[in-house]
Image (cartoon, grey):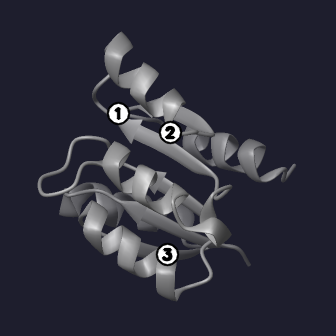
Amino acid sequence: MKNLLVVDDSKTILKTAKLVLEDKYNVYLANSGKMALDIVEKKPIDFVLMDVDMPEMNGIDAVRAIREIEALKDLPVIFFTALSSKEIVTDCINVGMSGYIVKPYKPDVLIEKIKSVLGEN
């Protein structure tokens, strides 16, 4: 089973994502970009689902920091956020996103996007 890290500052979003994904993946949770960075450095994470708008370290900065770690430079990341301005999407593209989902999302859409990025059918 693949290891998935979900990063969001909302406890509700984290709980919901865990419920949706835990029967298909080992789900790790982080409530900040800094916590996400700490987890990916210590655990064998296969995939990250990252919120953009978080205090302390936003998702884009967290992915930039992850990309600076040689072993993690190609780690697949899907951003999921309520933000969808052209500037935010461009920033996500520039840090090498694997996909983008706008909240609120449908669980089946989230699962299909993850499967697609991971090459699972």
Work out whether 94 lies above or below 45.
above
- In this view of the protein, can residue 46 be seen by the observer? no
Q: Position of residue 71 (x, y in %)?
A: 66, 71
Work out whether 7 lies above or below 82.
below
Q: Secondary structure at mark 1?
A: loop
Work out how far the residue at label 3 is from the one at label 2, CA to CA, in angstroms. Answer: 16 Å
| Residue that carries the numbered disc 2 in the rendered image | 95
Residues 34 and 83: in front is 34
Q: Position of residue 120 (x, y in %)?
A: 84, 53
Q: Residue at x 62, y 48 (%)?
A: 111
Q: Amino acid at mark 2?
A: Val
Q: Residue at x 32, y 49 (%)?
A: 61
Q: Residue at x 48, y 53 (%)?
A: 49
Work out whether 14 lies above or below 77.
below
Q: Of the numbered discs in the image, which one, if any, rests on residue 67?
A: none
- In which quadrant of the rendered view does residue 112 lie? top right
In this picture, residue 1 sits left or right of residue 22: right
Work out how far the residue at label 2 is from the one at label 1, CA to CA, in angstroms. Answer: 20 Å
Q: Earlier in the sequence, mark 2 or mark 1?
A: 2
| Residue that carries the numbered disc 3 in the rendered image | 40
Q: Amino acid at mark 3?
A: Val
- Count the labels in the image: 3
Crowding around mark 2 (Cα neighbors within 10 Å: few <14, some 14 to 19, many 20+) is some
Crowding around mark 3 (Cα neighbors within 10 Å: few <14, some 14 to 19, many 20+) is some
Q: Residue at x 41, y 28 (%)?
A: 91
Q: Which image quarter is the N terminus in? A: bottom right
Q: Earlier in the sequence, mark 1 or mark 3?
A: 3
In this picture, residue 113 sits left or right of residue 85: right
In the image, which is nearer the foreground, mark 2 or mark 1? 2
| Residue that carries the numbered disc 1 in the rendered image | 103
In the image, which is nearer the foreground, mark 1 or mark 3? 3
